[in-house]
Structures are given as C-alpha cells and as structure tokens.
Image (cartoon, grey):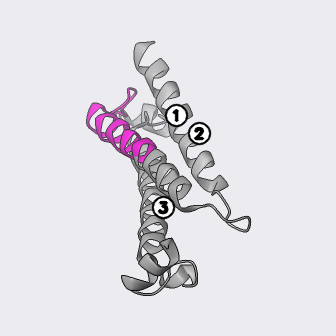
C-alpha cells in the first residue's frame, strides 16, 4: 500500500539514487555552506585577535592593537552560533532520512558542532577574563 502511494506521486524514492534526491542535495549544500562559514570564522578570528607588537614597532613608536577587536568578535560569535545551529539542523535532517544500513550518519557534522561549541566556550572565557 505504501509503495503504491510512493509510486503514485512519482518515482519511488527508495529506488532513486541519492545524488538525484532533492532532499539529499539540500542537506549536502547546507553542510558545505556551514563548513564555508567556519572558514570565514577563522578569517574573522585572525582579524579580531590582538596584534603582536614587534621590537621595530616599539622602536619607531608605531602603535599596535593590544586588545581584541569588538566588531570582529561580535561577528565571530554570531557566525559561530549560526554554524552550531545549522550543523544541528543538518544533523536532524540527516537523521530523518538515514534509515538504510549503508547510509552514513555524517561524522563531519559532529566535528563541526564540536568545533563550534568549543570555540564559543573559549571565546566566552576570553571575553569574561
């Protein structure tokens, strides 16, 4: 009965390859965008951190920023929160569709959520110190 309903609305999704499934493509695209956002977070971290003031800069009296940039830190925190939320949403979406034995759950999403969580906790401890 259920197979007849699935075939009635179009091609049986169990027989369709994963690469042609729109749901799977959305999940993969979201996963890729979140990893790209994490790379942007690394760039924001680079610009947010204090500059190292070298001996030449001190000799010539060139000022260097010795504190964290608040603008970049706010953007970094927001983007890390988006990364964490999107990775959790993607985990949920993958869990709703992965039912076959050969379906992988996506360890990279756990790694991404872990990196985002650890980064948010670390940044929070830096800002409170």
Q: Are marks 1 and 3 in contact (CB under 8 Å)?
A: no
* Quarter holding residue 29: bottom left
Q: Residue at x 40, y 27 (%)?
A: 66
65 or 94: nearer the eye? Answer: 94
Q: CA distance from mark 3 to mark 2?
A: 14 Å
Q: Secondary structure at mark 2?
A: helix
Q: CA distance from mark 1 to mark 3?
A: 17 Å
| Residue 4 picture location, percent across and down | 47, 80
Q: Nearer the viewer, mark 1 or mark 3?
A: 3
Determine if the magenta segment contains residue 86. no
| Residue 52 picture location, percent across and down | 49, 36
Determine if the magenta segment contains residue 72. yes
Residue 47 position (above or below residue 126): below
1 or 97: nearer the eye? Answer: 1
Which residues are the magenta region? 63-85
For residue 41, the mark is none
Question: Dot 2 corresponds to which residue?
Answer: 114
11 or 114: nearer the eye? Answer: 11
Residue 15 position (above or below residue 104): below
Question: Along the horizontal axis of the image, is 82 left or right of 36?
Answer: left
Sequence-first disc among 1 and 3: 3
Question: Dot 3 corresponds to which residue?
Answer: 31
Magenta stretch prevailing secondary structure? helix
Question: Along the horizontal axis of the image, is 64 left or right of 129?
Answer: left
Task: Look at the image and tell me in which quarter the C terminus lies.
Answer: top left
Outermost residue, right side: 101
Question: Dot 1 corresponds to which residue?
Answer: 117
């Amino acid at each position: 009965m259920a197979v007849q309903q699935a075939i009635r609305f179009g091609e049986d999704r169990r027989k369709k390859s994963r690469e042609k499934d729109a749901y799977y493509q959305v999940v993969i695209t979201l996963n890729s965008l979140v990893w790209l956002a994490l790379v942007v977070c690394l760039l924001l971290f680079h610009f947010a951190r204090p500059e190292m003031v070298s001996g030449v800069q001190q000799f010539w009296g060139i000022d260097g920023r010795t504190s964290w940039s608040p603008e970049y830190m706010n953007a970094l925190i927001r983007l890390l929160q988006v990364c964490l939320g999107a990775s959790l949403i993607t985990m949920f979406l993958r869990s709703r569709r992965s039912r076959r034995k050969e379906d992988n759950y996506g360890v990279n999403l756990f790694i991404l959520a872990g990196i985002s969580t650890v980064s948010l906790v670390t940044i929070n401890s830096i800002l409170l110190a």
